[in-house]
């Protein structure tokens, strides 16, 4: 039975390792019946849509997107950082949405060059060509840069040295200890991000966000005008940018259609039970929709979600969204 549903998945259009049809095949192998295709600031092109429409397998698919958005202006805007907002059932031919994706693509290249300069300043051996070899699309994201850094033995050695310095400082610095313990909890795949790849890292970037973004209200407006349902993705990983009270204020004024309560994958991205509980309490209190997904980037991520205790709870979520929001189903195989 193909009962499970993941409304957050990535392909080679951004930082996934499988193309659209491969993602659907993987879903079938692991008992998932519904997959939303939600790449970072990227939409399926015309040929991708042709291939998706020609798909005659059992998996239900729908076009989505994961838009990078500055936090609301009232709590800091661009200076505070960025969040991720899922747009489900969006129209991939919508001109403003396509224009935003093109601007974000260029913004990611600007960010890539800034991060490379930061990494070289630390002592890592990495170039723009190194990063581009790891990017299957023009949409350059952080995992591509991490892969470029960590492929070289001398860089892995330096990363271990930085982790050792952080561990030593954690022995007499409570704030560093908290960050170090959190890094260990999420596992080795997250070490580069916690050590040197973001502005909240142990060796922080001055700027780690994509440029040319909209604030949250503008992002949600863009999604809704493209026919989509706007859902805050894994907000609990970004509480340093938008805390629970700030999110509650957004929900109070109708600034979002839903919240993602659960993600499970192999990258250390797992919503702790307490975060799931808090998110579901906000969903109940403000009457918004709930979504769940893997945030998958690989076949292993899909398998991890299917094997989790939350997989069975994901069944039926897409039907509930359709009944509630009545989206245009042309951009799916539900019609």
Image (tube, rainbow, N blue to C red):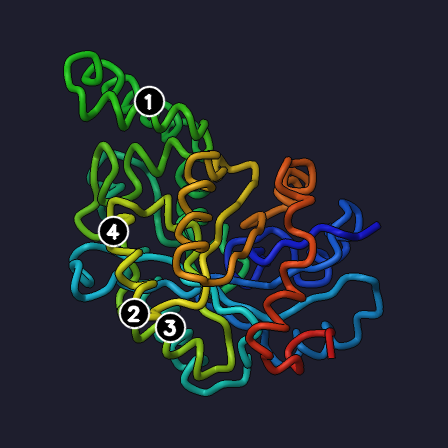
**Up-down relation of residue 313 to residue 46 (above or below):** above
Dot 1 lies on which element?
A: helix
Disc 1 and disc 4: Cα gap in Å? Answer: 25 Å
Disc 3 and disc 1: Cα gap in Å? Answer: 34 Å
Mark 1 Cα-neighbour bin, 10 Å: few <14, some 14–19, many ≥20: few
Disc 3 and disc 2: Cα gap in Å? Answer: 13 Å
Would residue 272 be visible to someone looking at this image? yes
| Lateral position of residue 246 relative to residue 184, left or right | left
Q: Residue furthest bottom?
A: 95
Which is more foreground, mark 3 or mark 1?
Answer: 3
Determine which of the numbered discs, if any, sits on residue 245 in the image. Answer: 4
Which is more foreground, mark 4 or mark 3?
Answer: 4
Disc 4 and disc 3: Cα gap in Å? Answer: 19 Å
Evaluate if marks 3 and 1 touch, with contact meaning CB atoms under 8 Å apart.
no
Task: Provide the residue designation for mark 1.
Answer: 181
Dot 3 lies on which element?
A: helix
Q: Earlier in the sequence, mark 3 or mark 1?
A: 1
Task: Provide the residue designation for mark 3.
Answer: 220
Which is more foreground, mark 1 or mark 4?
Answer: 4
User: Residue 57's image quarter?
Assistant: bottom right
| Lateral position of residue 182 relative to residue 262, left or right | left
**Up-down relation of residue 120 to residue 186 (above or below):** below
**Residue 182: percent from left, percent from top:** 34, 27
Task: Provide the residue designation for mark 2.
Answer: 253
Numbered marks: total: 4
Q: Earlier in the sequence, mark 1 or mark 4?
A: 1
């Amino acid at each position: 039975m193909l009962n499970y549903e993941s409304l957050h998945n990535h392909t080679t259009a951004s930082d996934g390792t499988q193309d659209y049809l491969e993602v659907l095949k993987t879903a079938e192998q692991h008992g998932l019946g519904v997959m939303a295709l939600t790449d970072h600031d990227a939409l399926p092109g015309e040929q991708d849509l042709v291939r998706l429409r020609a798909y005659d397998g059992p998996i239900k698919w729908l076009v989505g997107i994961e838009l990078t958005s500055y936090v609301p202006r009232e709590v800091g805007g661009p200076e505070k950082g960025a969040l991720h907002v899922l747009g489900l059932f969006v129209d991939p031919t919508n001109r403003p949405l396509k224009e935003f994706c093109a601007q974000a693509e260029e913004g990611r290249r600007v960010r890539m060059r800034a991060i490379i300069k930061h990494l070289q300043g630390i002592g890592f051996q990495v170039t723009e060509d190194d990063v581009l070899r790891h990017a299957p699309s023009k949409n350059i994201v952080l995992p591509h840069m991490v892969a470029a850094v960590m492929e070289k033995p001398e860089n892995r050695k330096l990363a271990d040295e930085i982790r050792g310095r952080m561990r030593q400082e954690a022995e007499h610095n409570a704030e560093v200890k908290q960050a170090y313990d959190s890094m260990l909890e999420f596992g080795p795949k997250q070490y580069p991000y916690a050590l040197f790849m973001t502005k909240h890292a142990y060796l922080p970037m001055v700027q780690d966000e994509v440029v040319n973004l909209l604030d949250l209200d503008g992002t949600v407006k863009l999604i809704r005008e493209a026919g989509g349902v706007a859902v805050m993705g894994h907000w609990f990983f970004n509480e340093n940018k938008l805390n629970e009270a700030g999110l509650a204020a957004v929900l109070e004024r109708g600034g979002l259609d839903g919240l993602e309560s659960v993600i499970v994958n192999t990258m250390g991205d797992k919503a702790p039970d307490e975060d799931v509980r808090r998110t579901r309490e906000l969903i109940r209190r403000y009457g918004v929709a709930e979504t769940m997904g893997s945030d998958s980037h690989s076949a292993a991520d899909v398998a991890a979600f299917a094997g989790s205790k939350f997989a069975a709870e994901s069944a039926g979520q897409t039907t509930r969204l359709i009944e509630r929001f009545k989206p245009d189903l042309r951009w799916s195989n539900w019609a």
